[in-house]
Image: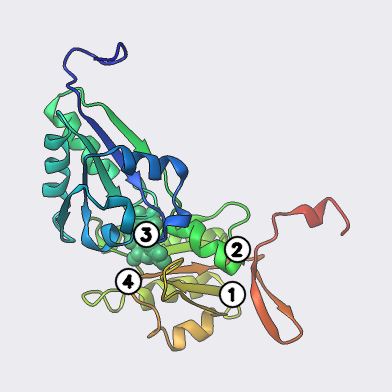
């Protein structure tokens, strides 16, 4: 047993790994090493599939969406004496599996050898594909009302859009929640002009990646393109669409250098 481990720790290890947006190239080297070091990989099928050759030959425990608590308990149990990776898309600490796993460890009172490995979250992935829409302060709000009430989400949206800084919307739409995005955009419209730039990126860094750059008014008119694999970046007061001639290249929120320097 390593000196750094306390007596209650066995030989196991639990990595909670942020696997990034969906492509091995966008995983951190530490995330890859954690998976490679593991005997067992736990996760939902959608995210495990993207790990491809990395998990060949390993024991894989797949579970479906909506069974997160069960999955987290299983991972903690297995990690008593085995090396286990709990794979979670994007960053495991952002609407991911890290908190539920840590809460289960906490409530069990066991001293589990756990490491949270950060990953590239959807806000960063989407922003990179749009240009630089999140250059200064911004907010992230999930429109999923499975674990947060819609009343709380509306309160947060109202506060966020009042500030006039970019707001990234996760879980913008699902089959069960068809109107949440329309409601969120209506709140945005109370505080921002109809010309406010918006970027929608679907399946960032996955084979079927698609993006759209449009205005708040245009997205309010038709958001049928947005689905549960999309991230919506609503610009702030200073956000603009970057064009070369008539060609839309991306979205820029100035960092503020223009106030200090001439370029
Ligand atoms: N832990 C994840 C977020 C999970 S919540 C992360 O840090 O990225 C699920 C939501 O994340 C989706 O509804 C979508 O809004 C966003 N998302 C995750 N991966 C994405 C991707 N590759 N492309 C676009 N949006 C993504």
Precedes in sequence: disc 3 or disc 4: 3
Circle 1/circle 2 CB separation < 8 Å: yes
Question: Label 2, on which residue?
Answer: 133
Circle 3/circle 4 CB separation < 8 Å: no
Precedes in sequence: disc 3 or disc 1: 3
* Mark 4 lies within 8 Å of ligand 1 (Cβ measured): yes
Q: Position of residue 101 (x, y in %)?
A: 22, 40
Q: Residue at x 77, y 53 (%)?
A: 257
Precedes in sequence: disc 2 or disc 3: 2
Residue 155, numbered label: 3
Image quadrant for the N terminus? top left
Circle 2/circle 3 CB separation < 8 Å: no
Viewer-nearest residue: 194 or 49: 49
| Secondary structure of the residue carrying numbered label 1 | strand
The label nearer to you, 3 versus 1, is 1
Q: Residue at x 53, y 73 (%)?
A: 199
Question: Label 1, on which residue?
Answer: 197
Alpha-carbon distance for marks 4 and 1? 21 Å
Horizontally, residue 6 falls left or right of residue 239, namely: left
Q: Residues within 10 Å of mark 4 (few under 14, many from 20)?
A: some
Alpha-carbon distance for marks 2 and 4? 21 Å
Precedes in sequence: disc 4 or disc 1: 1
Viewer-nearest residue: 16 or 237: 16
Q: Quadrant of residue 238?
A: bottom right
Alpha-carbon distance for marks 3 and 4? 22 Å
Residue 228, numbered label: 4
């Amino acid at each position: 047993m390593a000196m750094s481990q306390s007596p209650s720790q066995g030989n196991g290890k639990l990595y909670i790994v942020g696997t990034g947006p969906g492509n091995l190239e966008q995983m951190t080297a530490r995330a890859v090493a954690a998976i490679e070091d593991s005997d067992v990989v736990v996760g939902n099928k959608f995210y495990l599939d993207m790990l491809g050759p990395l998990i060949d030959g390993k024991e894989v425990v797949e579970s479906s969406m909506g069974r997160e608590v069960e999955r987290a308990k299983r991972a903690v149990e297995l990690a008593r004496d085995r090396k286990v990776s709990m794979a979670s898309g994007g960053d495991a600490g952002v609407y991911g599996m890290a908190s539920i796993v840590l809460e289960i460890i906490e409530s069990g009172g066991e001293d589990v050898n756990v490491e949270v490995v950060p990953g590239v979250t959807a806000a960063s992935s989407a922003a990179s594909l749009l240009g630089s829409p999140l250059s200064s302060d911004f907010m992230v709000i999930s429109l999923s009302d499975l674990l947060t009430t819609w009343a709380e989400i509306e309160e947060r949206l109202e506060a966020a859009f009042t500030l006039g800084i970019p707001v990234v919307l996760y879980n913008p739409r699902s089959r069960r929640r068809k109107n949440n995005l329309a409601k969120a955009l209506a709140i945005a419209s109370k505080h921002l002009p109809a010309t406010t730039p918006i970027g929608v990126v679907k399946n960032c860094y996955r084979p079927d990646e698609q993006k759209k750059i449009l205005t708040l008014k245009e997205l309010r008119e038709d958001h049928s393109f947005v689905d549960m694999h999309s991230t919506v970046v609503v610009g702030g007061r200073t956000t603009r669409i970057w064009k070369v001639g008539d060609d839309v290249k991306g979205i820029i929120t100035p960092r503020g250098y223009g106030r200090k320097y001439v370029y």
